[in-house]
Amino acid sequence: MECTTHFGDLVTLLDPGLLSLAEARLRNLRNGFELMLTPMLRGLDAAREHHIHILRQCADWIDAGRLQLRVSQAFPLAQAVNANRQIEAGQTLGKRSC
């Protein structure tokens, strides 16, 4: 929450219970919650097809070099503690496990 600007946007995958909604309110944030599993979990076939389209478009853009993923460092699962320390220290770009 501390990384958001006042009057900004917050889009998250996190459970709302993990967020300080009081702080979001004080910052006057527009909040969005994204869970791509919702169409599958709720039987929303049209929305599921839309999400499939989005993911295929992303794959096409990655293949064409229009969308690039940037990861500063990859850690094996055995080094998850070190990876988490890097994240907490704000020394990472992206997240990836292998």
Image (cartoon, grey):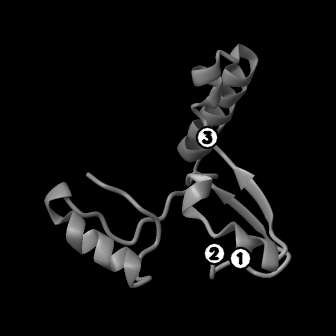
Q: Residue at x 19, y 58 (%)?
A: 76
The mark nearer the N terminus, 3 or 1, is 1
Return the residue nearer the eye: 10 or 22: 22
- Calculate the distance from the C-alpha at mark 2 to the C-alpha at mark 1: 7 Å
Q: Secondary structure at mark 2?
A: loop
**Residue 25 occupies which quadrant of the picture?**
bottom right
Rendered location of residue 58, percent (x, y) = 62, 41
Horizontally, is 64 left or right of 27 in the view? left
Mark 3 or 1: the one toward you? 1
On the image, the x and y values in percent for residue 50 come to 72, 26
Mark 2 or 1: the one toward you: 1
Which numbered marker is on residue 1?
2
- Give the residue at mark 3: 35
**Would you say 76 lies left or right of 14 here?**
left
Query: Disc 3 marks which amino acid?
Result: Leu
Q: Dot 2 surroundings within 10 Å: few (below 14), some, or many (20 or more)?
A: few
Q: Are marks 3 and 2 in contact (CB under 8 Å)?
A: no
- Counting residues from the start of the chain, the first of labels 3 and 2 encountered is 2
Q: Is residue 35 above or below residue 51?
A: below
The tag earlier along the polypeptide, 2 or 1, is 2
Q: Which mark is residue 5?
A: none
Q: CA distance from mark 3 to mark 1?
A: 22 Å
Q: Does residue 22 appear to the left or right of 8 in the view shown?
A: left
